[in-house]
Amino acid sequence: MSAHFLIRVQAARDADELSRQERKVAEFVLAAPDEAMRLSLAKIADAVGVSEPTVLRFCRKLNCANLQEFRIKMAGAEAIGLPATHAEIAPGSSMSEIAARVLDFSVSNLDNLRRQIDAAALQRVVDLLMKARSIHFWGNGASGIVARDAQQKFPLFGIPCMAETDSHQILINASTLSARDVVVAFSNTGRNQAMLPSIAAAQANGASVVVVTSSSNTPLARAASHVVCVPTLDNTDIYTPTISRIAALCIVDMLAIAVAQTRDEFASRKINTMKEAIVNVFRSETSTKHEN
């Protein structure tokens, strides 16, 4: 299924597909989608501070022949449900209003991910992970949290897994890899320049590199062996990219569960043994506390 049209607008902006002036139009559309759908060509140009031809070029960059087609696609986005944004949380909002807005924002974005997830791309990554000797998860900043979570699920993958979140350590890790090692790198923007040398080093050593990012048209995605797109409407002006992190965590679960289900009965028994050991230790600790 096609992505939510506003996410297509954001992806074009983030992937540097637009000129500086066209990017201003994209920012206006993302900040005020209702106005962008309603205003005339002249009024959009006036509101943004650009020329009318610039607005038309912006529309064509989004595969819209004219403003009318742009409006139709925007109307389709509204029918699906325009994603709420954190920016709409007014100062002085009550706790219940903040909670509702944040949850609505999360649900609408995850619903969009469900609508247009690329199952074939995920399956190709699962096939790659099934043949891997080891898996190396990379991520900086907020994406590092996702990398750590993925490493924590290593019993489901059934092979050694590592997580690196420091750029220098990632490069060191890349230099030690070889054929049959697989890297899964997380980057919401796909523009983490510090990770490009590490991707190149890993591939030079024969390792495969999967990038989980917002768009296939980003520097990291273009450098990768495989790409899993996780387009979301994160508002990073004030907040850290919470929604993209949640979506990426869901991708990790999808991959881990698919790999676990594909492995043989012996691997399944090992996972069950691991779970039983954890339960037994927990019960023993609980019993000791009660006795004390």
Image (spheres, helix red, strand yellow):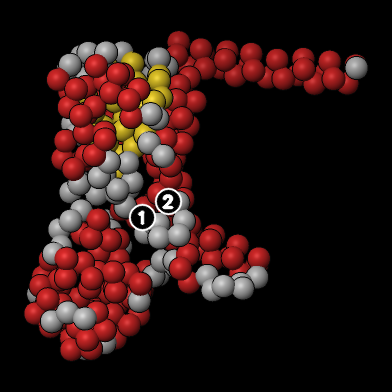
| Placement of 177 over or under 36, stated as above or below | above
Specify whether 92 is left or right of 87.
Answer: right
What residue do we see at 20% from left, 46% from top? 218
Residue labelled with disc 1: 232
Q: Amino acid at mark 1?
A: Thr
- Quadrant including the C terminus: top right
Residue 237 drawn at (x, y percent): 40, 60
Residue 39 drawn at (x, y percent): 26, 87
Specify whether 174 is left or right of 238.
Answer: left
How many C-alpha atoms fall within 10 Å of the one at disc 2: few (<14), some, or many (≥20)?
A: some
What residue do we see at 26% from left, 44% from top? 190
Q: Amino acid at mark 2?
A: Pro
Specify whether 236 is left or right of 217.
Answer: right
Q: Determine which quarter of the picture holds residue 65.
A: bottom left
Instruction: Tell me if I can see residue 147 in this picture.
Output: yes
Name the foreground residue: 250 vs 171.
171
What residue do we see at 16% from left, 65% from top? 20
Residue labelled with disc 2: 241
Q: Are marks 1 and 2 in contact (CB under 8 Å)?
A: yes
